[in-house]
């Protein structure tokens, strides 16, 4: 973490909420489901698929997990009703994982069942490493009965090589990302170049073994590596998709779509936008510098625009 990142995170509590809101607008679709549907329509019109995310995680009482489940059922209904080309992404702790895997399993199962009725799909996001085993356990249980559910693996974790090999044998649908949480050195790679190499190695293994992969990155080098791998393997674009966060690397997004690859944009929305924005920055302060540079028009990503 640079001094610049520390300064930005330190200043966060002093920045009035409306100003944080103003700058978050690019990354968050809005407060209401209608806002997310409107954003999804705009993205669909640009040739992008979406995955919708209700902001919120680490609930305090079990009842909140039922509310999250019910809202996700509404999101799936709205996607169907509005003819959106999109699915949903859920956070296991928002579905009660910290109260036990059974609670999360039952809640997520209800959403996967509804998605199945619509021919839709549910992605289980991966949170910090304290939840990895439980998340993969819930995913494994669901996978026994459903094929319309996928999970996420983080290239920064040392365990991911083994997890990926095992999940590929199950024919799992996997989103591969670098991993946003700052994890202990004992279990995670820290060096940016090593994480990139880990990403490429795991991506190639998954695609070779026939897994459908959501290639979630804005790192141009990794996008190039992914294009190289799908070219080498002669894969049809239906075997994988690129994935990006709302408001990030829009120019690169356009390039990927224009070259005939499928691309899905992660569309977060909800009333928890402020807690979400500030928590993310505290968890991973190096993002603060990236976003600040981006807002000032100085990030490498901006210069590509
Ligand atoms: C669709 C999607 C789903 C994800 N799901 C998960 C998940 O379930 N679990 C998890 O741990 N992580 C998840 N992530 C986050 C991921 O792990 C990385 O932290 C994040 O994508 C940044 O890594 P990068 O590969 O884009 O490379 P980086 O090197 O971090 O970023 C490359 C460039 O992209 C731009 N950039 C990247 N992120 C941002 C940002 N937030 N705001 C502004 N600019 C940015 C910057 O210009 C940066 O230089 C997800 C990411 C995506 C795209």
Image (cartoon, rainbow, N blue to C red):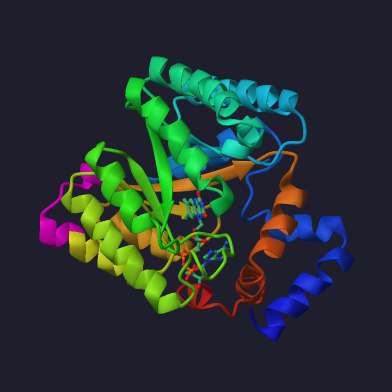
Q: Is residue 160 left or right of residue 231?
A: right
Q: Quadrant of the N terminus?
A: bottom right
Task: Based on the picture, tell me whether residue 233 belongs to the magenta stretch.
Answer: yes
Residue in view at x 83 percent, y 72 percent: 11
Q: As rendered, which of 305 and 91 lies closer to the eye? A: 91
Picture coordinates of residue 253, whole percent (x, y): 40, 59
Residue in view at x 89 percent, y 67 percent: 14
Residue extending farthest to the bottom is 3
Residue extending farthest to the front is 186
Q: Quadrant of residue 183?
A: bottom right
Q: Is residue 11 left or right of residue 71?
A: right
Q: What secondary structure do most residues of the magenta stretch adopt?
A: helix
Q: Is residue 124 left or right of residue 17?
A: left
The magenta-colored residue range is 230-240
Q: Is residue 238 left or right of residue 65?
A: left
Task: Based on the picture, tell me whether residue 264 belongs to the magenta stretch.
Answer: no
Picture coordinates of residue 37, whole percent (x, y): 57, 33
| Residue 195 visible, this angle | yes
Residue in view at x 51 percent, y 22 percent: 111
Q: Quadrant of residue 195?
A: bottom left
Residue in view at x 63 percent, y 56 percent: 26
Indicate whether 40 appears above or below 109. below
Number of marks in the rendered image: 0
Picture coordinates of residue 119, whole percent (x, y): 36, 21
Picture coordinates of residue 295, whole percent (x, y): 65, 71
Indicate whether 214 appears above or below 226. above
Q: As rendered, which of 71 and 95 lies closer to the eye? A: 95
| Residue 51 visible, this angle | no
């Amino acid at each position: 973490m640079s001094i610049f990142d520390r300064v930005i995170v330190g200043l966060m509590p002093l920045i009035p909420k409306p100003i944080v809101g103003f700058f978050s607008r690019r990354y968050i679709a809005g407060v209401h489901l209608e806002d997310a549907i409107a954003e999804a329509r705009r993205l669909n019109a640009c040739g992008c698929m979406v995955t919708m995310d209700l902001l919120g995680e680490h609930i305090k009482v079990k009842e909140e997990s039922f509310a999250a489940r019910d809202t996700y059922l509404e999101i799936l209904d709205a996607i169907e009703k509005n003819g959106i080309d999109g699915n949903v992404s859920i956070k296991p702790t928002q579905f009660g994982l910290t109260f036990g895997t059974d609670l999360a399993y039952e809640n997520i199962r209800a959403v996967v069942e509804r998605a199945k009725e619509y021919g839709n799909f549910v992605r289980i996001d991966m949170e910090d490493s304290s939840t990895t085993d439980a998340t993969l356990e819930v995913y494994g249980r669901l996978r026994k009965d459903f094929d319309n559910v996928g999970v996420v693996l983080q290239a920064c974790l040392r365990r991911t090589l083994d997890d990926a090999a095992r999940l590929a044998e199950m024919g799992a649908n996997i989103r591969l990302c670098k991993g946003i949480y700052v994890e202990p050195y004992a279990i995670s790679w820290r060096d940016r170049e090593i994480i990139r190499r880990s990403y490429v190695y795991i991506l190639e293994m998954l695609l070779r073994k026939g897994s459908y992969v959501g290639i979630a990155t804005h790192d141009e080098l990794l996008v190039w590596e992914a294009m190289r791998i799908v070219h080498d393997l002669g894969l049809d674009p239906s075997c994988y998709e690129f994935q990006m966060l709302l408001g990030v690397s829009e120019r690169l997004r356009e390039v990927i779509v224009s070259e005939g690859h499928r691309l899905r944009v992660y569309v977060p929305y909800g009333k928890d936008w402020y807690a979400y924005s500030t928590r993310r920055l505290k968890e991973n302060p190096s993002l603060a510098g990236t976003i600040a540079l981006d807002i000032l028009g100085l990030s490498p990503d901006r210069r590509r625009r």
